Image (spheres, rainbow, N blue to C red):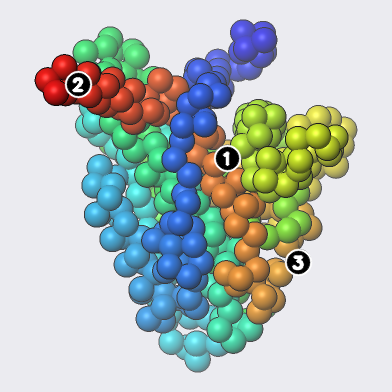
Amino acid sequence: MRVHHLLLLPAILRSAVLAYTPLSESTIQGLPSPGKDFDIKDGALLSPILIPRVPGTPGSEQVLQHFVDFFSDTLPDWKLSFQNSSSTTPVSNGKEVPFRNLIATRDPPWVEREGEVGRLVLVAHYDSKLTPKDFIGATDSAAPCAMLMHAARSIDNALTQKWDDMAGDALDELEDQKGIQIILLDGEEAFSSWTDTDSIYGARALAEEWENTYHPPLSTFSTPLASMDLFVLLDLLGSPPQRVPSYYKTSHWAYLNMADLESRLRKMGSFKSSPNHKSKRFSNEPRKKEPMFLYEADKKDTDRWTGGYIGDDHVPFIARGVEVLHIIPSPFPDVWHHPDDDGEHLDPDIVEDWALLTVTFAAEWMDLEGYLDDGKKDRRSAEVLKDELNGEMT
Ligand SMILES: [Zn+2]
């Protein structure tokens, strides 16, 4: 099946999209769950983001520092950079408000020059809306930010091992290797009401700057935008309803990859929010119809494609030719832009399911099957050996 699909795709997509081995069931089951790190009160990843974080305020500063500390302390191989801009807003009385995007990038170690590596780019916005007062924006987009942090750390060791293993490989195999980038954007929300100029401040500034940032002449990719193989934007995830259509025909191939992965995870019983999960259904009860987050895998060319109707951080990127997979539910969650969009109204199972889907999507894209056991197998056999030796000695 894989081969047939492979041949139907243009060459550039074939190499970018399908040159991976699907994750095995045992690999997926062995992935560490975020567990307590997604706790809304004291979880290490999520809880520090669940504060008001309007651009230019101390809350924004604090959350940005949380991301920086996380990457510097636990993922030192990710290169951090900032892209800063400033703008007046309809409520700033002529004062410039600062917007700071954080970019975390991990490329294969042999890549020496910018412009020689394509990347999977995972994106969410970290700012919160000015109104209603003390708005938290747990789905919008604190939880998606935590999911991306969890994804980065879940594949980090596997990337190291895989790239270490490849060190002696032929040049063309090395050249096929992709990098990964996580972008946490500032200033998505409108300060007054959504217009082209009062919204997505950070995304607009970044897309514009990167469009004009040229890699050295003769680079494979001319700009950091051209280096984006796929821009995956997560938004409004973590509270029902969570039905995500396929918005763009051009990126439907990527939607299908993620939808296929979701249905495999659901069949395995890995999705905690499923009515068929072992925590929710007695084994003697009949299976309920399995709901899908990505429910449009069978969408046809003649169906209604609504890409372009939802304004969000992807807009300035798609306008510059970047391939975008927009993971945002339609309709939006019930708590959308309501004071109830806080930690207490997140559904922890839904948050964890999206995190698992994000981790596995990134892991398959980076072709990490065989590397994700984190050396556990070796360690396990080493421990068994040690126990045996101890047994002999005592
Ligand atoms: Zn919002």
Q: Is mark 1 within 8 Å of ligand 1?
A: no
Which sits earlier in the primary sequence, circle 1 or circle 2?
A: 1
User: Measured along the vertical axis of the image, is residue 70 above or below residue 271?
Assistant: below
Q: Residues within 10 Å of mark 3 (few under 14, many from 20)?
A: few
Which sits earlier in the primary sequence, circle 3 or circle 1?
A: 3
Horizontal side, residue 120 vs residue 338: left or right: left
Horizontal side, residue 230 vs residue 215: left or right: right
Which mark, residue 357?
A: 1
CA separation in Å, label 3 and label 1: 22 Å
Q: Secondary structure at mark 2?
A: helix
Q: Where is residue 322, by image quadrant? A: top right
To which residue does mark 3 refer?
A: 334
Which amino acid does the dot numbered 2 rest on?
Answer: Gly
Which amino acid does the dot numbered 1 rest on?
Answer: Leu
Seen at 58% across and 40% down, the residue is 357
- The quadrant of the rendering that contains the N terminus is top right
Residue 82 is situated, as x and y percent measured from the top left of the image, at 32, 59
Horizontal side, residue 211 vs residue 213: left or right: right
Residue 127 is situated, as x and y percent measured from the top left of the image, at 49, 69
Residue 173 is situated, as x and y percent measured from the top left of the image, at 34, 14
Which mark, residue 391?
A: 2
Which amino acid does the dot numbered 3 rest on?
Answer: Asp
Which is more toward the observer, 367 or 56?
Answer: 367
Determine the residue located farthest toward the bottom in the rendered image: 93
